[in-house]
Amino acid sequence: MLGGALLSVSTQGSPLFTGQSDEYLLLLIGIIVLFGARRIYFGLNGIAYSTGRVFRMPALYLLFTVVSVFGFGTVSLYVVSTLALVPIAAVVGYLYATQSSFFYRNGLVYYRRHMYVLAFWIASYIARIVIEFAIPFNLAVEIALSAILSFTTGIVLGEALNIRKKYIEFVMTDAVPAAE
């Protein structure tokens, strides 16, 4: 039973996944850390706004979370209750993840995200994967980490909704400057 999002697919019979090797775990964590560092860098320095960009990554995080939670193989009260945290946390993220900011660069609207929201999601995702290798089949720990991951995913989704709302407000209230 492999519960991490990238590890949850059926991999039985695949030589890469048969040993749950330390090298594979380190490679997976390294890829996730590099991906997360890149997202945090662009989130802090600004990235050109597009609605697709704002919602694409949260949708991917939601997919990773769902695959991770369904790694147990069956739909149970655990799965349903863990995933029920996503919409609850989306409301929290919408109300409280309000630190994003907008600015113009070369005549385009750019935005900065709050780095702690994304950093916390990446940390919880890495913890979920590490625990899968370090303490396999410990249901209580996996449930706790899945709940944290689901809650954090909801906050990321709520933040995306808030970014969209703030973008509309920004564009409606600010005149677009001439290209620099």
Image (cartoon, grey):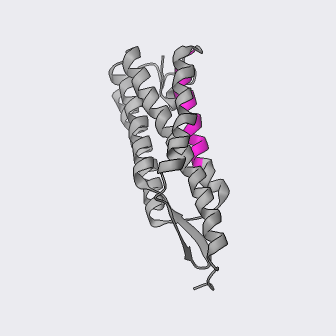
Kindly identify the residue that appears in the image at 63 percent across and 86 percent down: 178
Q: Main secondary structure of the magenta part?
A: helix
Q: Is residue 146 above or below residue 76?
A: below
- The answer to whether 119 appears left or right of 94 in the picture is left
Residue 114 location in percent, x, y?
Answer: 44, 56
Looking at the rendering, in which quadrant would you find the C terminus? Answer: bottom right
**Residue 59 colored magenta?**
yes
| Count of numbered tags | 0
Residue 20 seen in this snapshot: no
Q: Quadrant of residue 21?
A: top left
Q: Nearer the viewer, residue 159 or 28?
A: 159
At 40% from the left edge and 43% from the top edge, which residue is drawn? 120
Foreground of the two, 80 or 55: 80
The residue shown at (43%, 42%) is: 122
Image: 32 above or below 20: below
Start and end of the magenta stretch? 57-73
Q: Quadrant of residue 134?
A: top left
